[in-house]
Image (cartoon, helix red, strand yellow):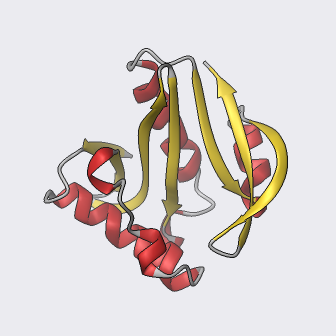
Amino acid sequence: MKFKWTEDTSSKVYNDALLIRKTVFVEEQKVPVELEIDELEAKTMHVVGYLNESAVATARIYQKEPGIFKIQRVAVLQTGRKKGTGKELMAEVERKIRTLESHQMVLDAQDYALSFYEKCGFTIEGKGFPDAGIPHHKMTKDI
């Protein structure tokens, strides 16, 4: 898989990220679009994974506080699932964050994906909570 990063919300890469997110979160999971597209869009770094030139996976990151980066909007299209695409995406996100003088990554994982993130080295922190009506848990990984 080939990865492309952008901070430009007018770029093709960003638009590919939005298409994936709208398909996975808005269409499949019924998250309201006004919750999915938020005020952080222009303040985050977006990555898209391409298989044979087709955008299939995305995530975004931002510095939450010095040394701590938050991972959000992790999504893989149906065509990329069960093929290791999510694992490759998370490895790329970690690679990028390691270059940014970070010591910890955090994310809010949907409960159905907790075991996936645990396999990526994340640990559940605290009690669960709803986000857009979907059960989540905070997870962290020291790097």
| Percent x, y of residue 105 | 58, 31
- For residue 139, above or below residue 84: above
Q: Residue at the spot x=72%, y=46% of the render?
A: 138
Q: Residue at the spot x=39%, y=64% of the render?
A: 38
- Nearest the viewer among 19 and 55 is 19
- Nearest the viewer among 90 and 11 is 11
* Residue most extreme to the right: 127
Q: How many numbered marks, from 0 up?
A: 0
| Percent x, y of residue 30 | 57, 84
- Nearest the viewer among 4 and 25 is 25
Q: Residue at the spot x=25%, y=58% of the render?
A: 14
| Percent x, y of residue 78 | 53, 72
State the image quarter where residue 51 is shown: bottom left
- For residue 15, above or below residue 124: below
* Residue most extreme to the left: 10
- For residue 74, above or below residue 35: above
| Percent x, y of residue 23 | 44, 78
What quarter of the picture does the C terminus occupy? top right
Q: Residue at the spot x=45%, y=27% of the render?
A: 97
Left or right of 77: which side holds 113?
Answer: right
Left or right of 68: which side holds 129?
Answer: right
